[in-house]
Image (cartoon, rainbow, N blue to C red):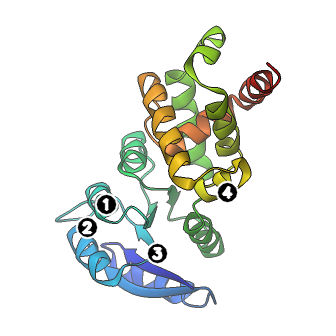
Amino acid sequence: MIRLLLVDDQNIFRQGLATLLSTEDDIEIVGEASHGEEAIQIATQLQPDVILMDVRMPICDGVTATREILERFPWMRVLVLTTFEDDEYIWESLKAGALGYILKRTPPEQVATAIRCVYLGYSQLGPTIASKVLSQLKAKASIPTTNYQQLFSKREFEILKLLAQGKNNQEVAQILHITEGTIKNYITNILSILSQFGVRDRIGAALWAKQNLALVVSLARLYFFT
């Protein structure tokens, strides 16, 4: 059962969404909050698995709440659900640690699917959001091909390839037969390298790897055979 916390300052929308999601057999609404400060308090008390977070709210916005919650409880998953698709909101939410960003016009059944995916550790971006993120990455993360092998180790290329396929840390660890803690260390190093090119979080790394998948795969194979 996925324990879900709803955070939105629009009471009618929040209550309507709660009604719709409560029909899902594997989702339990454990709490509701009308602003970020309340979300932090309730998340601390109820320890939800997933938080469905609005962005623009009074008292404390969703980005700040996401950052504070994940600093305290890094195992929780945050999925942003908002009407705003401004680049700034998207990037700040992802940098704060949100694992997904979708719009309120998303059909309820797709919202439920996104919640399940985020719960499992997969990133979820709405179609228009994904295109925005990819265009930003294309502009910011253009690394010369000749420098790839100098930037990443063989193992880091293997991890990038799996991130591009949507694998979470546990799955990557199982596939590569190493510990999940080791995977986290590798990803920290990968993000450190990519940060100089405008990629600052796991979702950005996964999207960057997906965008450059053919090259990442070919270099991973090159490392394997040399």
Determine the secondary structure under disc 1. Answer: helix
Between residues 50 and 135, which one lies in front from this camera angle?
Answer: 50
Q: CA distance from mark 3 to mark 2?
A: 17 Å
Determine the secondary structure under disc 3. Answer: loop
Residue named by callout 4 = 171
Callout 2–callout 1 Cβ contact below 8 Å: yes
Residue 172 vs 74, above or below: the answer is above
Label 2: how many Cα within 10 Å (few below 14, some 14–19, many 20+)? many
Label 3: how many Cα within 10 Å (few below 14, some 14–19, many 20+)? many
Provide residue 118's location: percent of width, then percent of height: 56, 64
Mark on residue 49?
3
First-in-chain label (4 vs 1): 1
Residue 49 vs 117, above or below: the answer is below
| Residue at (62, 87) in percent of width and height | 24
User: Which amino acid, by three-letter code, is at mark 3?
Assistant: Asp
Label 4: how many Cα within 10 Å (few below 14, some 14–19, many 20+)? some
First-in-chain label (2 vs 4): 2
Callout 4–callout 3 Cβ contact below 8 Å: no
